[in-house]
Image (cartoon, grey):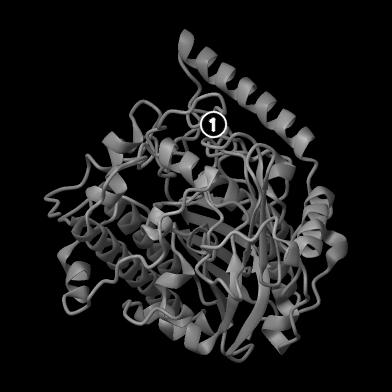
Amino acid sequence: MAARPNILLLQADQLSASALACYGNPFTKTPHIDRLAGTGVVFEGHYCNFPLCAPSRFSMMTGQLASRIGAYDNGAELPSAIPTFAHYLRAQGYRTCLSGKMHFVGADQLHGFDERLTSDIYPGDFAWTADWDAREHTDAGGPDAGVKSGRCTGSVQIDYDEQVAGEACAWFDGLSDGTDAPFLLTVSFTHPHDPFACTEEFWSLYDDVEIPLPTTPTVDDPHSQAMRRQYAMEGMEVSDDQVRNARRAYYGATSYVDAKMGQVLGALERSGQADNTIVIITSDHGEMLGDHGLWMKKVFYENALKIPMIVTCPERFTARRLSGLVSLVDLLPTMMGLVGDGHGDTTSLVEPLDGVDLSASILRGTPLSVRPLLAELTCEGTPGPVLMLRRGALKYIWSAVDPPILFDLETDPEEVINIAGESHVAEAEAALRHDITQHWDAGALACDVRLSQQRRLFVQQAHHAAGTPPDWDYRESGTPDTRWMRSNVGYNAWAYGSITDLEQ
């Protein structure tokens, strides 16, 4: 066995932990993920730090909260000077490769990967910059997510994930006998992100399943109301049949991405490198699926925040389940620890990270440290920064504009009773509020976000005012692939318009 392990990171998009059997779902069909969960380490309390695609991925890759690196929304640039786990592993002699989505914005479309096998699926410019002064729907899913779902014969997202898996398999097929440098291969799919549509093969897996309706009631806190407005879903009625249809298609898409992961794992086996490869499965954020009357993400409820983290390599460590709060910012230092056999060299880090190394817990079962879970929102639809800090079962949500929200997940796991302001939690709430101020300077953050928005909105407008706009989209060949989302077309027209033979 090689001294240093390879790493295969398999990432889904918008996959909630609650959609998987290893996190308690009684009916989803994900045999490949189930197998890895049975032989690996399952983190029972794993979360994203920003329930939105690009900021979440940037914090995952850098080990830092998105607000610390200016990744405020889906149109924010990941600065080229900030090291990612690809940079750190590359500096350790690893061959680093990306197949699939990472939602990079800006001229740097590699960020430490020395190879990229596919284009990204979303635009690389500032087209999706948030604007706190705009309250209208921003053409990102919206009401279509709940009502334009079902089985189909094809879609642009299926085309993309077929290419992502195919290129990753071909990459494995091209590996030599293992004498080359160790590798990091990141394979990042776009399913089960909305639109919720899957082919008959995966739809039929749920023929005999009674898809449950959401059990949590619609909530009317100001942040949830703002998200409904932002998605143009305020006051919208979605029938029970439509909800079941959307949820069934989501679970079908989850089974589809599991099958694509299985395809890549098969190629890994054929390469002869499986025994020395640590496989990691995660997502960027979750999906509300109608719970609390909400769809998609950009809220701090469990379905949007809690995501899988499974790490497996039976030749190196045994299966176990770990409780405790961990999050995506822990991935970078954990990777460094895993390639150092649980003794990662922190002196190689060029700056402090928000994440911590979990490798000792993975390799030897060391108990996880007790620390707070941090998450943030600075994107469109919010009146300013909305910040979340959780200690134990207490989840505290703070906004400069809206009243605070406090849930006790031990007594209220469905998050329906806001106990903020109640006398029996006054001391605990004050401590949580103090902790928020220790981790964020909300006033300064609000100013930084507004300035960033103004800069990017102006630059994007100037780029398209005259002349030829710069082309930052990554191209795996000299010929652009016009199937993928670019800033010259709206998201809904692109994503939903590409679905063929949709049966709702």
Image-quadrant location for residue 76: top right
Q: Which residue is mark 1?
A: 130
Query: Residue, x 75% and y 86% (percent of image)?
Result: 366
184 versus 274 height, above or below: above
**The N terminus lies in which quarter of the figure?**
bottom right
Which percent across, then down, holds residue 185? 53, 63
Q: Residues within 10 Å of mark 1 (few under 14, many from 20)?
A: many
Q: Nearer the viewer, residue 128 or 25?
A: 25
Circle 1: element type: loop
Q: Position of residue 157 (x, y in %)?
A: 31, 51
Q: Is residue 109 left or right of residue 245?
A: right
Q: Position of residue 204 (x, y in %)?
A: 17, 72
Which residue is at the front of the view, 379 or 433? 433
In front: 474, or 137? 137
Tell me, yes or no, if residue 8 can be seen here. yes
Examine the rendered structure and indicate whether residue 209 appears above or below residue 240.
Answer: below
Three-letter code for the amino acid on which mark 1 is drawn = Ala
Q: Residue furthest front?
A: 423
In-image side of 330 versus 188 (left or right): right
The image shows residue 167, relative to residue 467, as above or below, that is: below
Question: Can residue 180 be seen at all in this image of the molecule?
Answer: no
Please report the residue visible at 46 percent of the width from the left and 53 percent of the height from the top.
Answer: 219
Say which quadrant the C terminus sits in. Answer: bottom left
The residue located at (51%, 15%) in the rendering is 461
Report the label total: 1
Image side of residue 234 versus residue 461, left or right: left
Q: Residue furthest top?
A: 466
The picture places residue 419, in percent across and down from the top left corner, at: 64, 61
Q: Could you say which quadrant of the image residue 69 lies in?
A: top right
Check the image and report above or below for 22 versus 329: below
